[in-house]
Image (cartoon, rainbow, N blue to C red):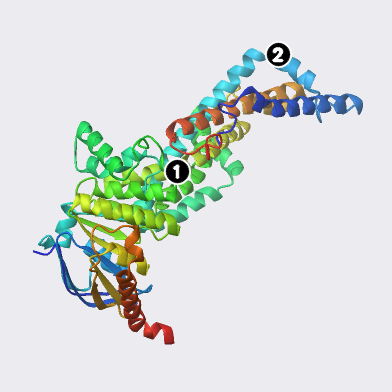
Amino acid sequence: MSVVEISGVSKEFKGGTVALQDIDLAIEQGEFISLIGPSGCGKSTLLRIIGDLIEPTGGSVTVNGKSARRAREDHDYGIVFQDAVLYNWRTVAKNVALPLELAGWDRDKRRRRVEEMLDLVELRGFGEHHPWQLSGGMQQRVSIARALSFEPSLLLMDEPFGALDEMTRERLNAELLRIWQASGSTVVFVTHSIPEAVFLSTRVVVMSPRPGRISKVIPIDLQQPRTAATREEPRFFELATEVREALHLGGLVEVTA
Amino acid sequence: MTLALGRRAGDWAPALVVAIAVLGLWEGIVKGFHIQRFLLPAPDAIWRSFRDNQGTLWHAGWFTFQEALGGFAIGCGVAILFAIVVARWDTLGSALMPYAIAANAIPIIAFAPITNAWFNPLNKTSKMVIAAVLCFFPVFVNVVRGLRSVKPQQLELMRSYAVGELTVFRLVRIPTALPFLFTALRVASVLAMIGAIVGEYYGGSLDSLGANINQDASLSQYEKAWAEIAIACIFGIGFYLAVALAERFATRWQPRMETAGS
């Protein structure tokens, strides 16, 4: 059974903008899927439809065999946004513990899990800090720890490293892969960076705009585990070129317009 | 941020120097240019009057402060309730907003004699109403803004947790609105004191500051009137500092000037 099953999904916003048209995509257990495309291709919209944060105007989405709504209510997924979206009035530890609090975990269990999660994202010892005391990259790691704290089977990420500098981004890419392998969850990752998509993914879904469609799905056959050396392999460049060409093909309308 | 709280003595020194310089200059000008005492009495004369009338002054100050505090509580309480309703139900918001703006447009000086007619002018209630009307608007406007200034992604995150609206209110909207609320409460604390005194001007118990200032000025007891103004300032500043202290306690999580960036 697929973790995410998207069939015939369309989304038309008020005013007639067609954000998505006839999207079909099945995501299997343990996959790392990147959605890549120019702005306006509806990749973030698709991610939000999977998370039932917005509703599609046509088609259906199931998560773990349930309706997207039911999956959201069952806390089947964790989500990370471009901004860390931390609550400034809570300490780092209490931010990570928030979903656990809402799920009714008791204090001891919460504390233990928060410690595990802070270890996982290498922020041990920062639990009592407030978010504004951390750098952007550290804040984003807190938000990843929060999204994974309740062990959701699915992790949705909306350009989580888009606001970070290149060096921090590459380091967090490697860290995310490690966390993904350790947690065994399925990831849907929205990005507009080609190297990021190729480095992280098991499959890259290339989307094109107006209306948002899937123009190509490219399997990434780079070996696991991936390291800094992966970025220098000839195969890495071949795949990056393939993604780039698919993007340009799909984005032709935009280039000539 | 929170003015004057928890600072070291060194931080106070410049303000103290300014105060001494201003008082010295004031004294010098009044004496040097023989300024009439009904225009401006010298600080030492005000101080003597203050000392001689201490008992009645503190008593009157406390009386007026109680009115201000009552008005503050009523005005801010109603404003917060209105703000929650307006932030939650847009339609009700557009129904109530014009009246909130109208309340703010009430010329408070014209309103004072009317509340005196509504309630017994010797009663504290008539002054509380004026203080409450003055406090209402800044608190209302700021709390509405605070409750609405939650970032969309914070709400999306809460939606992803599938929690109810009350939980969102408690966990996100209220903490977001707190700094806005306290900014308004600080303004309101000062306005409440002004409102109470303005109300007393148009007839109030002779236990109160406003009635005393009015009476002493007409009896040419200018030094005493100035001493009463000083007492009003002391209570006003005390009230403001108390609100600032409460703010510091309620928003401990906020970065402070002293610690930010360290």
User: Could you tell me which residue is drawn at 9 percent across and 62 percent down?
Assistant: A65
User: Could you tell me which residue is drawn at 53 percent across and 48 percent down?
Assistant: B104
**Which residue is more in the foreground, A161 or A87?**
A161
On the image, the x and y values in percent for residue A176 come to 30, 54
Secondary structure at badge 1 equals helix
Q: Chain of mark 1?
A: A
- Residue B190 in sight from this viewpoint: yes
Image-quadrant location for residue A38: bottom left
Residue that protrudes farthest toward the bottom in the picture: A256
Give the answer, above or below, for where A145 lies relative to A49. Answer: above
Q: Chain of mark 2?
A: B
Q: Amino acid at mark 2?
A: Arg
On the image, the x and y values in percent for residue B255 come to 49, 39
Q: Amino acid at mark 1?
A: Trp
On the image, the x and y values in percent for residue B58 come to 61, 18
Q: Which residue is mark 1?
A: A132
Q: Which residue is mark 2?
A: B51
Give the answer, above or below, for where B122 lies relative to A60. Answer: above
Residue that protrudes farthest toward the right in the picture: B33
Say whether residue A43 is left or right of residue B135. Answer: left
In which quadrant is the N terminus of chain B drawn?
Answer: top right
User: Could you tell me which residue is drawn at 41 percent across and 52 percent down?
Assistant: B148
Image-quadrant location for residue A114: top left
